[in-house]
Image (cartoon, rainbow, N blue to C red):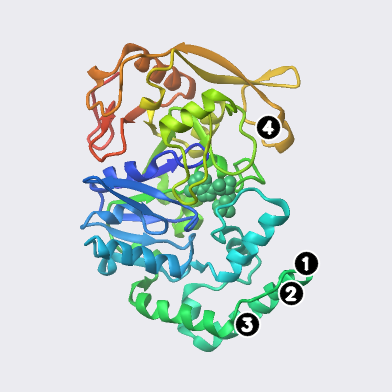
Amino acid sequence: MEKLVILGVQWGDEGKGKIVDLLSEHFDVAVRYQGGSNAGHTVVINEEKFILHLLPTGILHEHVIGVIAQGMVVDLEVLEQEIKGLEEKGIYIKDRLVISDRVHLVMPYHKLLDSLFEKKKGIGTTLRGIGPSYMFKYGRKGIRISDLYDEKRFYNLLEENLNFVKSICEKVFCERFELDLNSIYERQLSIFEKLKSNVKDAFRFFTERNKSILFEGAQGTLLDIDMGTYPFVTSSNSSALGLSNGTGLSPKYFSDAYFLGVAKAYVTRVGEGPFPTELKGKEGERLRELGGEYGSTTGRPRRCGWLDLVALKYATDVNGLSGLVLTKLDVLDGFEEVKVCVAYELDGEVIDYFPASYSQLSRVKPVYETLKGWNKSTKGAKDINELPKEALDYIRFIENYIGVSVVMLSTGPKRKEYIWLKEILKTKSSYS
Ligand code: IMP
């Protein structure tokens, strides 16, 4: 396989990190192309836990070149820390990291704005400055990493931006503004100096070489700025829609790619926004505790609920999925019954689509189908024959509804805890 795209198909935190880590072994290059340090991709290797925020997860494999492509917004301080953290664990990546010269930077004033906006009308962001950095990008006030080659230009852009943010801070929010132009200037340049040799034209890197590439989506389809639950979304295209603008590659380039979605066997969400199948009582708490559902970037408890097939079918169609990985099925072990949402009721009418309108989506009530649970543990299972019949029925039900095969089950956090149901890399099938 030459091109694999891995995408979250819920509200993020589907367990993409582990799947990317597992599959990137088979690729030459791993690419992150949207979002920034709002992501937290967790991988457990030999009992050691790694959480990557900016670097592509695939870079943990020694032979893989990692690319931070143009659609990302990069906080240089976080990137410096992340590289240092890996070096402390004996993983050296400096000679196999490409940072696109087109990436926009996340500056301290973007994080300040993120927290000011959250105070006023919060949507529960990660406070990593992501939204404001994209606001500056699309408002043509952003600073790209290549602007740092020209120190005078960088200084002027920074000064202009700081004056702009200072007036918003003082005049709109009546808060004291304490950021200092010279210290930001010096700090950014000093990190840039260390990373300069990694800054390249990533578009040319893609087009000049014939390499197998894995594209790592961050967040999830329902957080996509256009297709997600707007305005409770992130500020990038976190569905397959972000691939072209995030890399510079034509949509035609992706026509022969495999689009692999990753979904949890239930649903979680961090931050505010509509969540039709949310369980607010004891069942929700049970899922949160069993699933360890606390944010890897912010530590916030995640909201939990039953699997929403209306939303999953929508995400399948938005991304044009070729196959699906189901994660954390073991969290449902021991439930007497498991529910899946198969339609919504909107103002007395049953609908089977995911509404774009915020008010409609906030009003929908889930219509559930109840399936039999299973008593046997599926945790750590490595063979399909270890799965109870009811768990297989659950998987079949999902496949029938969304019209796409579940090709892999992740049965625990460790690298080796998975089962191929349909081996996509070698197209071998152990399940039909
Ligand atoms: P932002 O991306 O920090 O602006 O946050 C916008 C929304 O996206 C909030 O609801 C966040 O909780 C959510 N979000 C952002 N990144 C992630 C992620 O990696 N996993 C899950 N939710 C995320």
Secondary structure beneath label 3 = helix
Residue type at mark 3: give it: Glu
Q: What residue is at 24 percent from the left and 45 percent from the top?
A: 47
Q: Which residue in the structure is indicated by mark 4?
A: 361
The relative height of residue 415 versus residue 27 in the rendered view (above or below) is above
Residue 110, percent from left and from top:
60, 66
Q: Residue at x 64, y 40 (%)?
A: 273
| Mark seen at residue 172 | 1
Crowding around mark 1 (Cα neighbors within 10 Å: few <14, some 14 to 19, many 20+) is few
Depicted 356 relative to depicted 98: above or below: above
Amino acid type, label 1? Val
Name the foreground residue: 6 vs 184.
Answer: 184
Of label 1 and label 3, which has the lower sequence position?
3
Residue 328 locus on image (x, y percent): 38, 31
What residue is pinned by disc 2? 167
Q: Is residue 236 visible?
A: no
Q: Identify the image quadrant of residue 373.
A: top left
Disc nearest the viewer among 3 and 2: 2
Disc 4/disc 1 C-alpha distance (Å)? 32 Å
Q: Callout 2, which amino acid?
A: Ser
Q: What separation in Å lies between label 3 and label 2 (alpha carbons)?
A: 12 Å
Locate residue 353, reporting x and y percent.
Answer: 62, 26
In the rendered structure, which amino acid carries the disc numbered 4?
Answer: Leu
Q: Is residue 262 above or below residue 250?
A: above
Label whose residue precedes the other's in the sequence (2 or 4): 2
Say which of marks 2 and 4 sits in front: 2
**Is there a contact, CB below 8 Å, between mark 2 and mark 1?**
yes
Q: Residue furthest bottom?
A: 152
